[in-house]
Image (cartoon, rainbow, N blue to C red):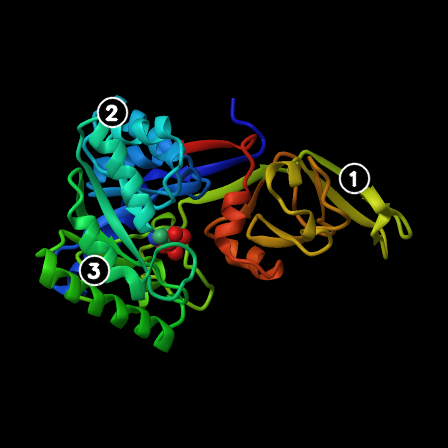
Amino acid sequence: MLPDTYAEIDLSQLIKNFKGIRSNIKKTTKSIKHVCSIVKANAYGHGISEISKILAESGTDYFGTANYRESIFLKTHLKKINHGSIPILCLGVLPQERESIQEIIGNGIEVGISSFGQAEMLNNVATSVNTSVNVHIKIDTGMNRIGLDIIEAYDSILKIKNFSHLKIKGIYSHLATSEIPDDNFTAGQINKFIEIVREVEQQTGEIKFKHIQNTGGIINNPSLKFFNMIRPGIILYGYSPTEDLQLPDRIQPVMTFKTKVKFIKKVKQGDTISYGRSYKVKHTSTIASLPVGYGDGYPRLLSNKGQVFIRKKLFPVVGNVCMDWIMIDVTGSKVRLEDTVEIFGKNYPVHKISKKLGTIPYEILCMIAPRVERVYIN
Ligand SMILES: Cc1ncc(COP(=O)(O)O)c(C=O)c1O
């Protein structure tokens, strides 16, 4: 039995998106790029187990995660589905506890290194268990979040290079404003990164993976030959970081957030709708109640602001969003009980919602609550 409210995840669309990204980048750079599919935050709310399986079968070269719990969960899952050999790069910061570091090493997770201290700690534990660890050096070129300070990076990397049990397999950085076309700051970050990598490689020899492009970087700076791996996140799921940044046509949303019309009633002028009575009915109206609310990740800030898509039309949310319900005005329409409602998806893109709330699509996707079943199709 399907639940009334669920997130429908179209796996064939995910495959199309993955292949589209890969073939576009191949066309523009005329070279083969490795793809590190970013599946952090439960694959941007889409469900890491199913998404990683499809991406593994589609040929992803790497997975990128945000923290070590995600990484170890993913590793265990990939082993179960016979894709345990696909490397996982954890983009987070190494924990301090020895047992945790041992677990990371034991699971063969590749470690993003953001400071010399982290490298030293990792090498100490790796030496004690006599296991070599693959690391990717993270350089901060202007994001100022995590990463080796660009000024100190060169010296630190040469010292890390000498650690007995660390192998520098990659070097990477992260862009702060990649979604803006022709952005000077992005160009500066890219140039700084290329420069430091060149200097480092003169001493260390070639580093296998060099990567900086997230979705914005892939779209706005597709032809960067210097880098041989890309790190697509939101584009895999069919969304652009901003409404203004156009994705290639065949890249489409993977998720449709759906519910159903479960109750319809007439209300008269002067009646009010929902908690707090924030909406007053102006004339006799028909109100439909939908079983979705902030408990499902439909933000309460959409009270009297949201819209939903039913039978090819948009209908406004009236009154305050409840934990489990929203009400919409369907006066004069053909809307009937049990009609399917698109909260967001191909017809009503998630950007429309994020824009109303002054946020980004990433946040709306990540807010879909655990109680919303993910239903996989195709
Ligand atoms: C280090 C790193 N790389 C890649 C990504 C993927 O970014 P996007 O979803 O914009 O493609 C992220 C996401 O925030 C990230 O933190």
- Mark 1 vs 3, N-terminal side: 3
- Circle 2 residue: 79
Q: Which mark is residue 347?
A: none
- Mark 3 vs 2, N-terminal side: 3
Q: Is residue 377 visible?
A: no
Q: Callout 1: 10 Å neighbours few (<14), some, many (20+)?
A: few
The amino acid type, in three-letter code, at marker 3 is Ile
- Circle 3 residue: 25
| Residue 165 image point, x, y percent | 17, 37
Looking at the image, is 193 positioned above or below residue 47? below
In this view, the mark in front (2 or 1)? 2
In the displayed structure image, the side of residue 364 where residue 216 appears, left or right: left
In the displayed structure image, the side of residue 158 where residue 50 appears, left or right: right
> Observer-nearest residue: 273 or 132?
132
Q: Secondary structure at mark 1?
A: strand
3D distance between C-alphas at marks 1 and 3: 52 Å
In the displayed structure image, the side of residue 356 where residue 169 appears, left or right: left
Residue lying at the far right of the rendered structure: 270
| Residue 188 image point, x, y percent | 32, 74
Residue 120, by quadrant, is top left
| Residue 323 image point, x, y percent | 70, 37
Q: Is residue 100 visible?
A: yes
- Mark 2 vs 1, N-terminal side: 2
Q: Secondary structure at mark 3?
A: helix
In the displayed structure image, the side of residue 68 where residue 123 appears, left or right: left
The amino acid type, in three-letter code, at marker 2 is Lys
Residue 142, by quadrant, is bottom left
- Circle 1 residue: 265
The amino acid type, in three-letter code, at marker 1 is Lys
